[in-house]
Amino acid sequence: MSRINDVGGMTGFAAIVQEPDEPPFHADWEAHVLALNAALIRRGIYNLDEFRDAQERLPVPEYLAASYYERWFAAIRVLLVEKGVVDEADLEPPRG
Amino acid sequence: MADRFAPGDRVRTRAADPDGHTRLPRYARGAVGTVVERAGAHPLADERARGGAPDPHAVHHVRFAAADLFGAGDHDVVVELWEDYLEEAP
Amino acid sequence: MSDHHPSSAISAGVRHVEALLESRGLLDPGEIDARIDAFLAGGSPANGARIVAHAWTDPGFAGRLLADANTAIRELGLSMAGGLQEQRLKVVANSAAEHHVVVCTLCSCYPIALLGPSPSWYKSEAYRSRVVRDPRGVLREFGWEPPADTAITVWDASAESRYLVVPRRPEGTDGLAEEELARLVTRNGLIGTAAV
């Protein structure tokens, strides 16, 4: 089924916005997510296509509401659970 | 194994809408284009996304006229496609 | 894609997952910081500018670059092997007859190991959706449009290659040294959304 990532040729998205002197990352955690993903792929926990697939399978409202690296982190969490690396409950930081 | 397609070949892309990850964009499905050149050989992304580790298959740059994809436009779009997505076009 | 969200909650979530994986032996202590440092020290648009300036001044190199970019950029001490694996680099050169512009409509493929992270606009649905259908309209939004008799080719990075555009050398730059020429080249020019 055509997925939400497959946008080539569509219309109706917002205008293209350029950011002058854009930094490589907009927050420290974004760099951490990028490095975490690379580490997990290097270790063979999952491959790059499984990672893309996990993003594409996110619920569409969640996908569209998320920023670029929020999607990445959501996909990492999905794969860690699906691959049996962690339990879903373990992913949430303790409160307090 | 010899390439199924060579530069200059006319090819038609698969029209099917697969139930999973694929690297054949929706806008380029069921369209006829021309092979530009080979872009190496790689395991098919569709299968790798299911955890498989298939043998590499040839990938080609395929040039389409925008008018054939969108019904308008005087530009071309070159899409990079696994041979699995392609069949010979008359 | 939404704008960048307040990050305290997600930041805590990321730290938590890192600590969890470290405790299970799936991450080494300090590994994430080392990877970030290596990433930031790796690719840069300046690498692309060097390639372009060298191609402008050395037609032999330009020919080798278009035929086999991975091999050619090693002449400049550059490589496509800095990421998860060596990726094929496909270089296309603009001319009076043809202007090239690059997109990844399915995700955000970009030669990160060579050029560093892509700009946010390159990753946006706005750019990815429209440039394949209406490249002239998109280029006008970037403040520049090729002449009407220049054909436009859009390259969709839909598989394993990564792309780099060699812009046309600006007129009136005959006297400039290669380093000065490199300073004229912009990141947008390397993607094809600027003239240079």
Image (cartoon, grey):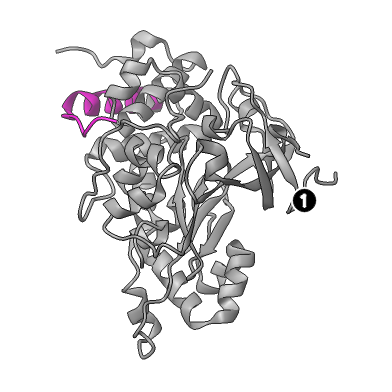
Identify the residue at image location x=43%, y=40%. C108
Residue C46: quarter of image: bottom left
User: What secondary structure is marked by label 1?
Assistant: loop
* Image position of B54 (left or right of C57): right
Residue C191: quarter of image: bottom left
Q: Residues within 10 Å of mark 1 (few under 14, many from 20)?
A: some
Query: Is residue C158 something that shows in the picture?
Result: no
- Comparing C177 with C165, the one in front is C165
- Residue lying farthest to the right in this orientation: B1
Query: Is residue C43 something that shows in the picture?
Result: yes
Identify the residue at image location x=66%, y=25%. B52
User: Is-magenta flag for residue B85?
Assistant: no
Identify the chain of the residue marked 1, using the numbered disc in the image: B
Q: Whole-percent x and y of residue C43?
A: 40, 57
Q: Whole-percent x and y of residue C101?
A: 44, 54
User: Is-magenta flag for residue C3?
Assistant: yes
Q: Whole-percent x and y of residue A74?
A: 36, 22
Q: In the figure, A41 relative to B60: above or below?
A: above
Identify the residue at image location x=36%, y=91%. C175
Give the dominant element type of the magenta stretch: helix, strand or loop: helix
- Residue lying farthest to the bottom in this orientation: C175
Which residue is under mark 1?
B6
Q: Whole-percent x and y of residue A61?
A: 32, 16
Q: Which stretch is magenta?
A: C1-21
Q: In the figure, A67 relative to B66: above or below?
A: above
Residue type of the residue flagged with mark 1: Ala
Residue C32: quarter of image: top left
- Comparing A90 with C78, the one in front is C78
- Comparing A56 with C73, the one in front is A56
Identify the residue at image location x=80%, y=46%. B3
